[in-house]
Image (cartoon, rainbow, N blue to C red):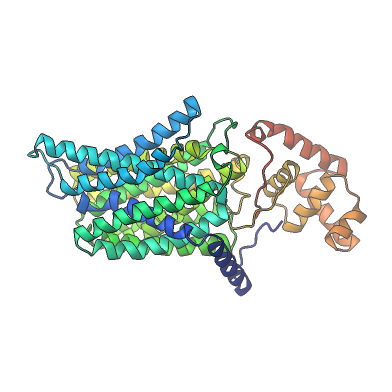
Amino acid sequence: MSMFRTGLTGKAVLSASQDVGKVLRDDPLLFLGFGMFWIWIWYVFQSPAIGALGADSSPLGVLPWVLPLSAYAAGFFILGALYFCKRIIPKSRAYKAGIPCLMTVGLAACSLIPSPSFAASSLEVAIYAVGSVAMGLSSAFLHVEWGRLSGSLGPRRTIVHAACGTLFASAAIVVIANTPLSVSLAALVAFSWAGAAVVFRATARRKGIYAQGSHAELRISVKFIVTAFTQGCSLGVLQIIMFKSHTQLDGFAVSALGFSIGALLVVAAALVCKMDFNRLIYHIGFPLMALGCLLVALLASAVACGGLVHAAGYRFVDILIWALMAYIMKYNDMPANWVSSITTCWLILGQFAGTFCGWTALTVLGVPQGMSVPCMVIVFVLMLCALLATSTHNLRTGWGMVAPGESDVELSRFDRHCMMIAKEYRLTEREAEVFSYIAQGFPRKYICEKLVVADGTVKAHTRSIYQKLDIHSRQDAMKLIEAHLSDYAGDDADGPERPVPLV
């Protein structure tokens, strides 16, 4: 029960390094698969070479960017609706083989018509539309499969593979972006097939993975949705500003470096310092994204500097979102086709909202005022979201207790609620341990033996606990935990008792 172990010591660094090495040795191909999937996503939805952002001279403005991303969102909606209405999870061999086929067909079609315009023929528009839909749908389908695999891995292993995959993808995308288009397309096709093979091979080895959450009541945290939406808004604003500021040529280098920094920060904060989700996302990730937006607003002549900082913060939060989805799927017994679909749909919706606001500001106000206004708004929204999301009310979600870098330790529902009370009343690490034993009715002698401490030490901790909780006896402590269990009974009905990694 280590509640606030955040020291960046040499021992902690060595332990985290050994842990990362063990995770990679257990599944040596997974981080490469993650990386290949993200290479595809970054290139398809950000590269002007194949029309994801469109050419600057296109009369359709941001339309070439909107169409494939809309299809991407539609893919998540289809999978989520199928599960919500019919409990259907596509998993046939034809479905799995069709995903990389659709990715290849869509890439080929969009590479033929990289930037449709009003002067384009109906055939060209049709080819581009078919390619965009194929790429968007297939990307969503593969995204959910990676989400399903993350759910079986758990948050800690997901962070390791996601961070290492990011480092691999960041290096590879810079190389790909600076090669001839034909070579880039060939590499993307190879990565799409190889990445799909890795994830389907990994899921095939895990029995019962498609049955996860089959009997769960489908619900999702509003806090999670707001977090994903806000993250998407910041991305949309920065994307359109980077594009309109004519920085798309070095955009890959800036994003790749920022993503790499974000991945390393996640490893340091989550695996070394073992911080909880609340502090990771809202005390580090969101402020880092806000700082990037602030730099863009203040340094109009050096947009890349702000873009770099925002990219680091965005990737930091993105990896944690994956880890949080893994936690929800594994410990709350929720299906990937629901959790991944709903969360990513809201992120994309936020990206649309941010892009529209940024594009409108640039069109109406021009540069640089059109850059600073939406960026300052995003700074305010990010910090407001971080402030509200870390209030004491979010103990109900448990995020303030869950440290994704901790090893998976099984705790009972009773122990989980003891920790929630300890967190709420700011008990120290040792006080939390003593309180757990007191609430279970154990005598002081037993507590001394279990914790290997003197009787006077337990007495001192007990007095401090009673003072903080405003109780006067062991019976009061037992009544407090019983009342807490009763108050949160509805939330514990989400699924079976689940282990909660604690800070």
How many marks are shown on the rendered structure? 0
Query: On the rendered structure, is 109 left or right of 288?
Result: left
Residue 45 image point, x, y percent:
29, 48
- Position of the N terminus, as image quadrant, is bottom right
Whether residue 470 is visible: yes
Residue 69 image point, x, y percent:
30, 41
> Which residue appears at 47% of the width and 25% of the height?
85
> Which residue appears at 70% of the width and 32% of the height?
487
Residue 101 image point, x, y percent:
31, 44
> Which residue appears at 67% of the width and 37% of the height?
496
> Which residue appears at 59% of the width and 58% of the height?
405
Query: On the rendered structure, is 322 left or right of 449?
Result: left
Query: On the rendered structure, is 433 left or right of 279?
Result: right
Name the outermost residue toward the top: 85
Toward which corner of the image does residue 208 lie, by quadrant? top right
Whether residue 300 is visible: no
